[in-house]
Amino acid sequence: MRLDWILVLLILSNLRLMASARMGAKIRTVAAQGVLLGLVPLLAGAHTPGLRSLVVALAGMFVKGAVFPWLLHRALRESREGREVQPYIGYMGSLLAALTGLVGALLLSLRLAPFPAGATALLVMAAFFSIYAGLFLIISRKRAINQVLGFLVLENGVFLFAAGVMGRTSLLVEVGILLDVLVAVFVMGLTLFHINREFDHMETDRLTDLRD
Amino acid sequence: MNWVLAALGIWLAGGLAAWMAGRRPGLSASLCLGSLCLGALCFAGPVAGALWSAPLEWRQSWAFPGGDLVLHLDALAAWFLLPALFLSLAGAWYGKGYWSGHGHAYPGGKAWFFYNLLTGAIAVVLLAGNALLFLAAWEVMAVASFFLVLCHHQEENVRRAGWVYLLATHLGAAPLLALFLLAGTRTGSLEFAAWAAAPEAWAGIGGLALCLALVGFGSKAGLFPFHVWLPEAHPAAPSHVSALLSGIMLKTGLYGLLRFTSLLPAPPDWWPWTLIALGSVSGMYGILYAMAQRDLKRFLAYSSMENIGILFLGFGLSELGRLHGNPAWSALAWMGCLWHVWNHALGKGVLFLSAGSVLHTTGTVDMERLGGLSRRMPWTSRTFLVGAAALCGIPPLNGFWSELALLGAALLAIVQSPGSPMLAGMLVLGSLAWMGGLAVAAFARSAGVVFLGEPRSESLADGGSESPLLRGPLILLASACLLLSLIGPAILNPLAKVMESRRPSFTTLEFPFRAELQQRLFFAWTGLVILVFFILALALLRRRLLSRRTVESSVTWDCGYARPAAGMQYTAGSFSQPATSVLVPVVDLRREGDPPRGIFPVPARLQAHIADPLLQRFYRPVLIAIARLPERLHWLQHGNLHLYVLYVAATLIFLLFWLMD
């Protein structure tokens, strides 16, 4: 039951990400999403969490809830622009797309049933919706920070799916994923910084000079 | 088998060390040569064991899918390994001298690393008992040789050659991958031994498998329609690398085919005919084009193609014998084919290294500019002559034996088996006669134009002699040619061991004619030894007769002209003109120029250009057409990141829903 609340909150946070224009709020939302997600492995699955899962979950919450927002806020300060000005898809359209995605994820999760113990249709739906939201953010927004956030949300979806459906994953895999994401965000943060310095903007739609 | 692993390890370590020491060419070359020597010593025991007693096997379980790591050293592998080891050693020795002088762009320690890597990869290809390992080694071999071809990548045509080679080798590997996957799914294993143990799995796909093998292995061997990379890559590579590529790497294609067909129960009817036809076309086409080349190394590359043709003729004839109950001629043809592997490896090794010496000393391999080099480079001209005679099959040299065996097999097939083997025998006989005749003409042309007469360009008239550093490996290989010929019939014992590895094995027939063969070969050998003594006696006699007289030397082309000039000599083009002009319908020869006119002709000009029609008229248009196809999709690539991600997302969603239904 507690898990369901978390899942609903995750879905709502995705909706907010897709509908909001303010970058600062979006970064905070993604951070909150990371913390909520850290709780999922502890609550999902048939088994009781051990000390190991607890440590991994705490580490994940720390990285996603504190380190990433700090990195991204820094990049945001550098760019001095707090809003997404002209997205490819407007905010009304984004909300409609979000609803479509939500329905699609629901249909998809219903078709995938039955699930292993511990996983519910709601969890699978939330996972698919997160992936969808992440891809949507990457595709429809121009500011480069959005692409980083989209990547994080997408990864959150994959993580949610793995944690909920697979149940127990090995320590190596969990830590490996965490490190992967950490490195990816570091690299993206650095890239953002350099893009900003070189081109004096962070609009990814204007970065077409390097094409073949 | 631990020795083999040690040898592979030593090669790798030596190559890496040579790379590290790249700043000091001498040290780097010594490291490479030393590691190759040590590795060859380690290999000596196992190879001898496989050739004279029992095969060895090494097996190591492996975490990856695709079965165990298996190295299998049997007599067939050992037979190919021996020349590989020898030639790679001689090549490294030569390379040490070749890359030491000034002005001969030393490509750095990495070239030595890739040289060792190539040697090791060839060894693993020959030893692999598992398809995955084989394919991995095959690719390493291709990549290492690609980097070696690109040693002098500063030149534009070298880069082009490297590109053609890379393309050809990858296109050639694709059918092999398909073949191995096909075999793997049918038999449930990727081990060669398991394929041989499941003959029923091949029912219905035997023909397809053989076709794939022919394209894949044939393109590595430089067989007729897949040969286009060969005359590009061999002239571009440094000479000792060309020697290794032509002497050994081409043979891995043949080895693959021999190995693979020995796994199949029985070939379909068309198979031996295909081999004989392709071998015949490659051989005739190769030697004809060799005749028309003016680049010495390109000439040698085409001559390699001719020799591959000879190998495939022997192989095809013996495969035909497999369908006719393994008669004696089949065994003889197989023997000739295997024997020729050694002979061509040694002979072509000498020739490529000699051509390298010419390039090293004069800076060019353009035959129309060379001439009279026998005075400047006495040793190189002698070794070149030995190599040329060996490849023409002229008696006191080793090529004679294998061609004798092949001709004997063809004759026996005609005499003993009426019907289709008789036809095949006639075809083989006719092709060999064509190749033999033109080969003598072609080698007489190249040796004569390059080493005899007078220099054709003034810049070559004077200059230093050949580098003494390059002499050693040349003499080593040339004497190996002679020695191999003199021990000729003794080779029958290890060869018989190799022939057991074919299936159905020839030993099941108790080798009925082995005693007879031994006897006949002994006769031939006696004749050969008498010939050698006769030549020696003639030389002694000449020396003795001339000893008390004054000996003068004069201009070679001094037959009645008051003032002979270099331009009066036969050029390479004029020498081959009768042969090429008769065959204009076959050969793509373009001539342009202004012929001399009038009673007092003004300067005239003639330019002849010969191109490989297969490359110009088939591969180029086809490849260009293929390259145009993706250009139509160029509008998809606009540089907008968002749309790229959208493509990925759309594909993912499409796949998801597609899999759900």
Image: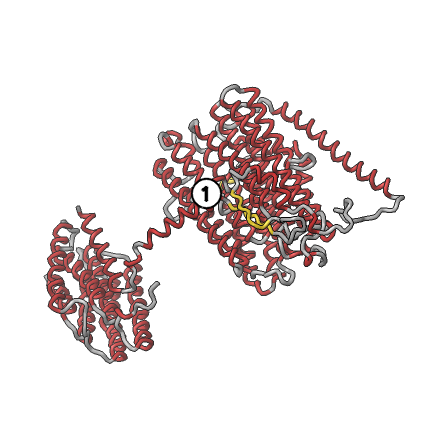
**Foreground residue among B493 and B618:** B618
x 53%, y 20%: residue:
B417
Tag count = 1
x 57%, y 24%: residue:
B511
Q: Amino acid at mark 1?
A: Val
Mark 1 nearby-residue class (10 Å; few <14, some 14–19, many ≥20): many
Parent chain of label 1 = B
Residue B78 in sight in this render: no
Q: Position of residue B310 (x, y in %)?
A: 56, 35
Q: Is residue B431 left or right of residue B361?
A: left
Q: Is residue A145 left or right of residue B578?
A: left
Q: Position of residue B370 (x, y in %)?
A: 66, 52
Residue B553 in sight in this render: yes
Q: Quadrant of residue A41?
A: bottom left
x 36%, y 38%: residue:
B182
**Foreground residue among B630 and A17:** B630
**Foreground residue among A102 and B324:** B324
Q: Taking B135 as reference, is B29 above or below it? A: below
Q: Is residue A202 left or right of residue B436?
A: left
Which residue sits furthest front?
B599
Circle 1: element type: strand
Q: Position of residue B421 (x, y in %)?
A: 51, 23
Q: Position of residue B399 (x, y in %)?
A: 63, 36
Identify the residue under disc 1. B70
Q: Quadrant of residue B132?
A: top left
Which residue sits furthest right?
B548
Q: Taking B283 as reference, is A204 above or below it? A: below
Q: Quadrant of residue A25?
A: bottom left
